[in-house]
Image: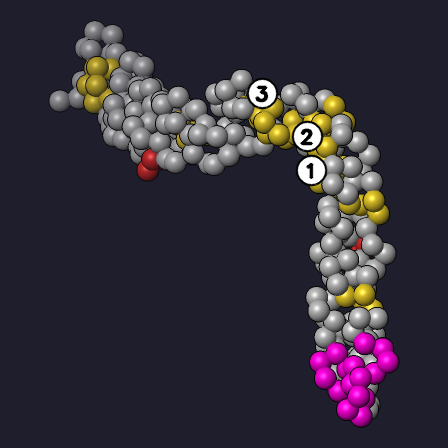
């Protein structure tokens, strides 16, 4: 039987002498049962401090008002500590903290947070430290440079390559050149003038092809003038000089070097 007076409608039972509630109706707590249990509680809460007896899924804390980490698998965690039982991929630790954004892949060790490998430019246990300036990739464990950005060389990538080099072993040996230059070790020669876009390999070969009217590795041979052109496009193959669009009237064969059954004065070897 409820012995509480009408001023405490949420009391389920109370002391007869002072009217203090000893039991609240579900969903209430406090001396007079005048406080609502947290919306995060499942069922009742402690009458003295409002502590939830159990939390809704995805919440934790005394009043179940704190969200579990987004890294918790299935969104669940310990209702008292917030610790996740299992982390999603890409998260680590008791509360499933996100792996470092400098990890080269989205995952890391689930207990320690250690990255499997670092992105270029970073090193350290969780890839939080930056490599030296001009160091493209450094060793994950101590930051020693493994490769330099274009234009630099040396153990600390603090020395400049020679002019026209993009990468080098030292100041006298280039390993790649700026697009418009070539030359073994030195990059001191200009690419052949008829290279498409003026670009060539380190040995001077035009890797993009030739300007209209030329062919050969170095685009130093002229297409036969009897090759047909269409909309000012290349008259012959930049690889072997064969006419791409047929011959002008009166000429035949792949190179348009024959006229009326005889070789034209201008041949493929012009």
Label 3's element?
loop
Reading the chain from its start, which is encountered first: label 1 or label 3? 3
Give the left or right position of residue 80, taking residue 246 as reference: left
Q: Residue at x 84, y 47 (%)?
A: 190
Give the left or right position of residue 12, taking residue 242 as reference: left
Percent position of residue 56, x then y: 31, 32
Q: Quadrant of residue 220?
A: bottom right
Reading the chain from its start, which is encountered first: label 2 or label 1? 2
Q: Residue at x 26, y 26 (%)?
A: 54
Q: Residue at x 52, y 29 (%)?
A: 118
The scheme the figure's colours follow is secondary structure
Q: Quadrant of residue 262?
A: bottom right
Q: Are marks 2 and 1 in contact (CB under 8 Å)?
A: yes
Look at the image and tell me in which quarter the N terminus lies. top left
Q: Callout 1: 10 Å neighbours few (<14), some, many (20+)?
A: some
Residue named by callout 1: 175
Front in this rendered view, residue 73 or 237? 237
Give the left or right position of residue 124, taking residue 96 as reference: right
Residue named by callout 2: 169
Percent position of residue 164, x then y: 80, 38
Q: Residue at x 65, y 21 (%)?
A: 155
Which of discs 2 and 3 lies nearer the camera? The answer is 2
Asked whether residue 70 appears in the rendered view, the answer is no
Percent position of residue 73, x then y: 34, 35
* Real-space Cα separation, disc 1 to disc 3, in angstroms: 21 Å
Reading the chain from its start, which is encountered first: label 2 or label 3? 3
* Real-space Cα separation, disc 2 to disc 1, in angstroms: 7 Å
Residue named by callout 3: 144
């Amino acid at each position: 039987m409820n012995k509480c007076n009408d001023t405490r409608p949420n009391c389920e039972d109370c002391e007869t002498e002072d009217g203090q509630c000893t039991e609240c109706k579900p969903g209430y707590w406090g001396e007079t049962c005048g406080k609502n249990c947290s919306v995060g509680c499942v069922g009742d809460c402690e009458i003295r401090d409002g502590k939830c007896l159990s939390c809704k899924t995805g919440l934790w804390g005394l009043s179940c008002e704190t969200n579990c980490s987004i890294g918790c698998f299935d969104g669940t965690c310990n209702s008292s500590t917030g610790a996740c039982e299992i982390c999603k991929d890409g998260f680590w630790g008791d509360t499933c903290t996100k792996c470092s954004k400098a990890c080269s892949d989205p995952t890391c060790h689930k207990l320690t947070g250690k990255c499997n490998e670092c992105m270029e430019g970073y090193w350290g246990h969780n890839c939080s430290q930056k490599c030296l300036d001009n160091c493209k990739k450094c060793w994950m464990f101590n930051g020693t440079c493994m490769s330099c950005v274009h234009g630099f060389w040396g153990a600390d990538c603090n020395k400049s390559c020679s002019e026209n080099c993009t990468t080098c072993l030292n100041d006298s040996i280039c390993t790649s050149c700026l697009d418009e230059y070539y030359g073994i070790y030195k990059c001191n020669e200009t690419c052949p003038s008829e290279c498409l876009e003026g670009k060539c390999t380190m040995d001077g070969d035009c890797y993009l092809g030739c300007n209209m009217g030329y062919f050969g590795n170095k685009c130093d041979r002229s297409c036969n003038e009897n090759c047909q052109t269409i909309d000012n496009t290349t008259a012959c193959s930049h690889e072997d000089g064969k006419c791409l669009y047929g011959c002008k009237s009166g000429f035949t064969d792949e190179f348009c070097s024959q006229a009326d059954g005889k070789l034209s004065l201008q041949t493929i070897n012009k």
